[in-house]
């Protein structure tokens, strides 16, 4: 692949991740699964339970891991380009992260508690000391950050639990009513859900799931040959990552009362599936000699599309009082419609503008005061 195609490949992978997030987020956007079990107690039909399981295997957590990897990749590219223009990359990236933090706070408070931008903004600062680090240091960091997961998984061997013991059905009903009520009640429920999701005790687990993917992306950016030339090794890793990822994600579906399998799916299955998806796009692009530009458009406007997905969900499920009323079979249809709408909208937008609206504002604020 030439330079143009390599950049295009990253856009396509990022676009694929954003479209996948539309399916991964549809359940938490529309139902109180934050307080539910897996499998969910909210649906009883076989086809709805099947869709929930498929979303768990193919979407939940996988695309956020892929997006995190792309964030780490973009960090290195941003720093290199900033330095090439004569700017201080450390200062510019820090400004960029503070702006991202502000966007994330607004999104989390007023749209959806499941915002990931705040976490990306805060953990992103930890990448700064690694900008000029050699590849072996980053590889070592990946192993160090992942090591606690091994200890956690070891301690969960043989530990089973009954999901029903942790459910409060009355509270699940009250959450549904609060979001359907909207207004101040809905706002306070969203705030409580955000504080519950990102409470201090959860931050180490978030760090162990997100930061290694940052590092993998940064490592790939420092070894761009991985993207330049598709070899037999790509196919071998594609098969290995795919088989291992699918197997590990299947385990909690087969035995949902195992905390070991649930934690393995999150800490190992999600990253493997994200690498499998990323390699899938590279291999497809290599066979097609480029193309997939419609998905690449989503990647070029990824921040705008991520926020747009959740804004659409906010209106459908909360403004129109449909929260907690639609089964997965209907939610999948909504996700497909949203994805097709975003593909069309991104295509039209980029015919008129060079960047997405949020990307444009983000860039202008980042470079505000810079002479280059």
Image (spheres, helix red, strand yellow):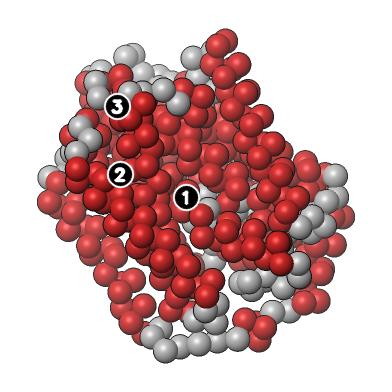
Considering the image in quadrants, where does the C terminus appear? top left
Helix, strand or loop status at disc 2 = helix
Q: Nearer the viewer, mark 2 or mark 3?
A: 3
Which residue lies under the disc numbered 2? 217
Q: Residues within 10 Å of mark 2 (few under 14, many from 20)?
A: many
First in residue order: circle 1 vs circle 3: 3
The residue indicated by pointer 1 is 64
Which disc number belongs to residue 360?
A: none
For residue 155, above or below residue 182: below
Chain-order first, disc 2 or disc 3? 3
Residue furthest top in the image: 352
Residue at x-position 55% and y-position 86%: 161
Q: Nearer the N terminus, badge 1 or badge 2? A: 1
Q: Which residue is mark 3?
A: 6
Residue at 52% over, 49% down = 116
Residue 227 is at least partly visible in this image: yes
Residue 104's spot in the image, x, y percent? Answer: 55, 43
Horizontal placement of 197 versus 61: left or right? Answer: right
Q: Secondary structure at mark 1?
A: helix
Quadrant of residue 133 in the image? top left
The residue sitting at 72% across, 43% down in the picture is: 334
């Amino acid at each position: 692949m030439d330079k143009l195609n390599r950049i295009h490949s990253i856009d396509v992978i990022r676009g694929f991740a954003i479209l996948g997030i539309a399916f991964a987020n549809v359940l938490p956007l529309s139902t109180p699964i934050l307080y539910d079990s897996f499998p969910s107690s909210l649906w009883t039909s076989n086809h709805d339970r099947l869709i929930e399981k498929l979303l768990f295997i193919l979407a939940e957590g996988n695309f956020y891991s892929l997006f995190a990897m792309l964030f780490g990749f973009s960090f290195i590219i941003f720093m290199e380009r900033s330095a090439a223009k004569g700017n201080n990359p450390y200062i510019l990236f820090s400004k960029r992260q503070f702006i991202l933090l502000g966007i994330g706070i607004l999104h989390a408070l007023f749209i959806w508690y499941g915002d990931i931008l705040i976490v990306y903004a805060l953990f992103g600062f930890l990448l700064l000391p690694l900008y000029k680090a050699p590849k072996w240091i980053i590889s070592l960091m990946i192993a160090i950050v992942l090591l606690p997961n091994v200890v956690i998984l070891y301690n969960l061997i043989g530990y089973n639990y009954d999901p029903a013991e942790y459910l409060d059905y009355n509270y699940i009903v009250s959450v549904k009513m609060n979001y359907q009520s909207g207004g101040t009640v809905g706002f306070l429920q969203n705030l409580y859900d955000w504080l519950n999701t990102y409470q201090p005790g959860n931050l180490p687990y978030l760090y162990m799931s997100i930061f290694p993917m940052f590092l993998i992306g940064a490592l790939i950016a420092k070894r761009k040959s991985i993207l330049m030339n598709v070899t037999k090794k790509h196919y071998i890793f594609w098969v290995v990552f795919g088989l291992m990822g699918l197997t590990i994600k299947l385990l909690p579906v087969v035995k949902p009362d195992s905390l070991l399998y649930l934690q393995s799916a999150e800490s190992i299955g999600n990253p493997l599936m994200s690498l499998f998806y990323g390699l899938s796009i590279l291999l497809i692009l290599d066979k097609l000699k480029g193309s997939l530009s419609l998905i690449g458009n989503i990647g070029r406007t990824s921040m705008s599309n991520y926020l747009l997905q959740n804004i659409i969900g906010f209106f459908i499920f909360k403004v129109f009082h449909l929260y907690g009323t639609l089964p997965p079979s209907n939610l999948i249809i909504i996700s497909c419609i949203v994805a097709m709408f975003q593909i069309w909208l991104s295509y039209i937008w980029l015919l008129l503008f060079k960047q997405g609206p949020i990307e444009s504002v983000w860039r202008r604020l980042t470079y505000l005061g810079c002479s280059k």
